[in-house]
Image (tube, helix red, strand yellow):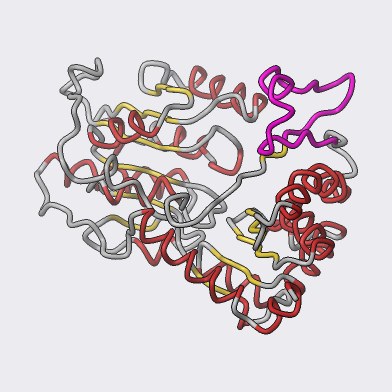
Amino acid sequence: MGSLMEVTTIQPVPFFPGLRALPGWVRDDLGARTVAPTFYFPGVLKHLDATWFARAIKPPLSSLHNNGRLDLIDAHFGFPDGAAALRVARELGVPGVVTLRGVEKEQVNTTLIGRELRDTLRRADGCICVSQSLAQIALRNGAPEYSLAVIPNGVDDSLFNMRPGPSTRAQMNFPSDRPIVVAVGHVNPTKQYHLLVHALTNRSVRRLNPLLLIVGSTLRDRRYTRMLTALVHELGLSADVMFTGEQPPVLVAAYLKVADCFVSVSRREGCCNALLEALACGVPVIATAVGDNALFINQQSGRLVEAIPGAIAHAVADSLDASRQGGDGMVRPACVNDWSQVADEVLDFFHRILGSPRSAALLA
């Protein structure tokens, strides 16, 4: 995106005096326009987060505006990011765009946060949704149809492609005689990894002796991580489940390229990046019908599954059996775009917003 237009990223960093201090790298870089220390109450009064957020991002945005370098604000996630950014956009007299990424599906049904989110959707100059399902949520909750654009996520074609990976299973110390199942995403309850772990105990899967790689941070929800690791040990699967921790994209691509199948049993998604990356690598996918997963998966690329251990197990076993037998080979779905295509679509949408009568009135 930065090669198409000047982009400044403002990164709010939450802190609470005496409980969560600012990280050292933030304290060392407080003069940078991209860092915005953001006060918040941990775990309570979450409906006030947009207020603290707005206070944090206003100074760097005002500086950009005063220097003639601010045409439009795009905030990712409807709350608190979008709600806060829209407040500042109105104060500065520039258009405000909100990009919905998935968490809004749950937020909109809460009382105080839901009210702020609905107000944000109604008042935003533009709303980018990463999936059709999010666009429907936005429409039902007050977003004008003319303000919407559906622009799914993309993949980095230089990494996530159907060319052989630079590392083989042997080089990555994986056994050559065991099928590999890969799940990508930070370890938290939304990803429902406990269902996938339970599926490994099913007889149809056990006969195939797969190795499950869970690729993602184990630090985002320590309570769920402890529960999950205890479950793995309790079920006698310690030799069958590997937690890789958070990995750079180049290693995520390497894991996918040695995989026999990819599994996502999330209870919520906007546009699942990991699923798109697996499809781009030609890995058969198994996923729950959340977000827009159903629009990306066809009979050649994988299957949708209920979030039930038995159903997951049978889908994994069928997929691994097909992989072992050679299958018919996968073709990358045409609906999986490169990030450069996504950037072009986003830029076109920004130009449309800036050219609208509503934006012209703000900027006058």
In the picture provided, is 98 more to the left or to the right than 200? right
User: Residue 55 appears at what percent x and percent y?
Assistant: 85, 45
The answer to whether residue 277 is left or right of residue 194 is: left
Seen from the viewer's position, the closer of residues 358 and 42 is 358
> Which part of the image, by quadrant, shows the C terminus?
bottom right
Quadrant of res 52: top right
Instruction: Name the image quarter holding residue 172.
Output: top left
Residue at 71 percent of width and 21 percent of height? 23
Extreme front residue here? 67
Q: Position of residue 324 (x, y in %)?
A: 13, 39
Residue beneath the point at 59% across and 35% down: 188
Seen from the viewer's position, the closer of residues 318 and 288 is 288
In the depicted structure, whether residue 277 falls above or below residue 201: below
x, y percent for residue 360: 69, 79
Up the image or down, 20 lies above or below 158; here it is above
The percent position of residue 13, horizontal first and vertical second, equals 72, 34
Is residue 22 part of the magenta span, yes or no? yes
Instruction: Identify whether 238 is placed above or below 263.
Output: above
Picture residue at 68% right of the left edge, 32% below the top:
32
Task: Specify whether 284 is left or right of 65.
Answer: left
Q: Which residues are magenta?
A: 13-39
Residue 210, located in which quarter of the rendered image? top left
Give the residue at x 43% y 30%. Answer: 214
Answer whether residue 203 is magenta in the image: no
Numbered disc total:
0
